[in-house]
Image (tube, grey):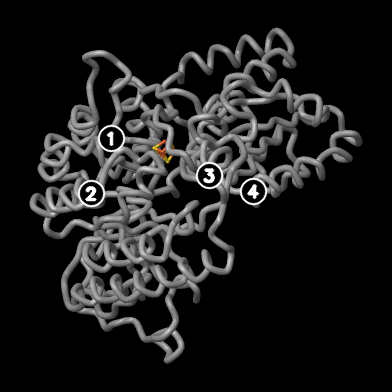
Amino acid sequence: MKYHIWTAGCQMNVADSQRVASELEKLGYRYTGNYRQADVLVLNTCVVRQSAEDKAVGFLWSLKPIKEAKPDKTIALMGCLVGAKGGSKLAKTFPHVDVFMPPSEPGPLVDYLLAQASEQTALAQRHKLQDEEFSLVLPLHEKNNLVTAHVPIIYGCNHVCTFCIIPARRGRERSRPVGEIAAEVRSLVAQGVREVTLLGQIVDRYGYDVPDGPRLPDLLRVLDGINGLHRIRFLTSHPNYMSDELLDTVAALPKVCEHIEIPNQAGDDQVLKHMKREYRMADYYDLIARIRARMPDVSIATDIIVGFPGETEAQFQRTLDTLAELKLDVCHIAMYSPRPGTVSAKLLPDDVPLEEKKRRLQAVNTLQEEIVSDINATLLGRQIEILVEEKQRGRWRGRTRTNKLVFFEDASDEDWQGRLVEVEITWTGPWSLRGKLPGQTPIKMTEAELILPLAAA
Ligand code: SF4
């Protein structure tokens, strides 16, 4: 029996799909890359942008004739298209879907498949699920081949940023118990994983929903003690919950990387107020200073939305000024688009023309490319530790603790995957770095490669 999972959207969805795959593996199903051959097909959907929703709906409709030709095939719809309340409305529109699963909840699919199985098979499957309750079982092709994995630690979000559909789709905050997370990380390490990224919509609110419960610093201390695990990251943080205790813990624990993802969204107080972000620019500047005081080599990533309703040229300029002053390592940038069901879509006119949004997006991109080129150039000639993830087109690729992509070559048969390696940086660009193992010659590059960002090569 085979399964296939189609995943769209953010890292949380990728992690959710991994959870579904794990449950299916425990039930005895095996992964296939061809969805047409799958007995169980899961669509894990995203609705953050209209284009993502349209893509999922288009794929869903294309499955109707496949289901009619093979009624035994199980089709399951998961994620933000289903939402926290389940799929009762969607069931009328898509009668060829057998199971609807809210985000992060594989349970309905497991129950459906158990109900379809013979009594004897279902009994054996239940035992297996119980025995491996807190293990995350990777598909065969990923076992001992996957170096990094995402581990959700808190689901949902209690904030109401006016542009964001996530609270409506993923529900209120729910933190997972420390013991459950630690058991899952240990099971991943046993299967070859060496780095975990802890996930939450507001990851630094981990534990806030449990009175007197452990918080993120406590969880980090537990995970830092797991043998065989090399690195820990966490994302995405909210500026309001980056406590000094959390920053001190990140700085002190050897496995927790100096890499912070902390969205700003806009550089102007009035826009932030309209977004209901609940901090002011002075708070954001203060936070960046507190982070850098503890970790001078830290890399900081931010998110920016351009063209939010009412954003004037002067307000946008303040965003550019902020980026130019703070010089952050990464800027994930999006053009505002109203999503049905959000406060901004209901109450704020989408009044920045598309062409102007595009111009602002390009201006941020151009500035950020200059900033990150300069930051990366300071790494030239330095010896830096990378965790090697895989070999790609004859070159090994890995990441620094600060999450920068590094390529290096090695003519020997040495298998570097999953290992920490010191490389000397021999070339830097905005999107990647290149290095060499000590005592070896640098990677040869063509003229075109020297100019183009490697990510695009
Ligand atoms: S903090 Fe704001 S942007 Fe992030 S998930 Fe919650 S509502 Fe959305």
Q: Secondary structure at mark 2?
A: helix
Residue highlighted by disc 3: 348
Cα separation, mark 1 vs mark 2, equals 15 Å
Q: Are marks 3 and 1 in contact (CB under 8 Å)?
A: no
Residue highlighted by disc 1: 204
Relative placement, left or right, of 222 versus 411 is left
* Label located before the other in sequence (3 or 4): 4
Tag of residue 284: 2
Cα separation, mark 4 vs mark 2, equals 30 Å
Q: Secondary structure at mark 4?
A: helix
Give 241 or 363, whichever is nearer the viewer.
363
Foreground label between 3 and 4: 3
Amino acid type at mark 1? Asp
Residue occupying image coordinates x 46% and y 71%: 362
Asked whether the viewer can see residue 294, the reply is yes
Cα separation, mark 3 vs mark 1, equals 29 Å
Tag of residue 50: 4
Quadrant in the picture for residue 53: top right
Residue occupying image coordinates x 33% and y 77%: 429
Residue occupying image coordinates x 45% and y 59%: 306
Looking at the picture, does residue 285 appear above or below residue 276? Answer: below
Query: Which image quarter is the N terminus in?
Result: top right
Residue occupying image coordinates x 25% and y 80%: 426
Foreground label between 1 and 2: 2
